[in-house]
Amino acid sequence: MIDRMLGAALLKVETYEEVEQDQSALPQALLIVTAVSIAGAVGNVLSPDSDVVRGVILGVVGGVVLWALWALVTWIVGSTILRIAITQADWGQLARGTGFAQTPGLLNVFTFLPVVGVFIPLVVFFWRFAAMVVAVHQCLDYISSWRAVAVILISFIPTFILYAIVAGILGLQ
C-alpha cells in the first residue's frame, strides 16, 4: 500500500491504472482518506482554541463522506455528461482512484508549524488537484487531461451542495 501511495503522490499513471483495476484496493483507499482526514484534523487541532476530539471525529467523518460523494458525482459526470466512446467505469474505480489521489493530504498534519504551516494547505491543494486529474483521466479512460479537469470542475458544485446537505443532517458543521 505504501508503494501505491508513493506512486499516487508522484502522479504515476501506472499506479492509478493498478488501483482502478484492483477491486480489493477500496479498503486501502478508505484507509488513505481516513488517514488524510486525521492528518488534517490533527494539523487543525494543534492550532490554539481547538476542540481536539470534536475536530478529529468531525474531520474524519466529514472527509470520508466528502470523498464518497466526490467519487459519486465525478463518476456520474465523467461517465455520462463527459464520457467518450471508450469510457467504462463504475463508482468503485473512481473511489479507489480518487482515494489514492488524496495521499498528498497527509502533509496537512504540519499546518500547525509556524511560518511554513500557512503554505502547506495551498501546496497540498494543488498537489491533490493534480493527482485527481491523473486519477480521473485514468479511471475514466480519457485521452485528454483537459476533459478530466472539466469533470473535476463540473463535479465541484454538486458535490459541495450534497456535502452541505449531508453535513447539516449529520451535524458535521
Image: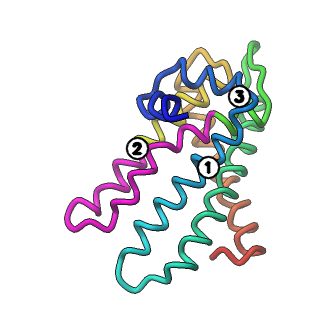
Marks 3/1: CA–CA distance: 15 Å
Amino acid type, mark 2: Phe
Q: Which mark is residue 126?
A: 2
Q: Earlier in the sequence, mark 3 or mark 1?
A: 3
Boundaries of the magenta span = 97-125
Q: Which mark is residue 82?
A: 3
- Residue 58 x %, y %: 61, 71
Which of discs 3 and 2 lies nearer the camera? The answer is: 2
139 or 110, which lies in front?
110
Amino acid type, mark 1: Phe
Above/below status of 38 relative to 84: below
Element type at mark 2: helix
Q: Where is mark 1, residue-wise?
A: 156
- How is colour applied across the structure in the image? rainbow
Amino acid type, mark 3: Leu
Marks 1/2: CA–CA distance: 15 Å
Q: CB under 8 Å between callouts 3 and 2?
A: no
Q: Which mark is residue 56?
A: none
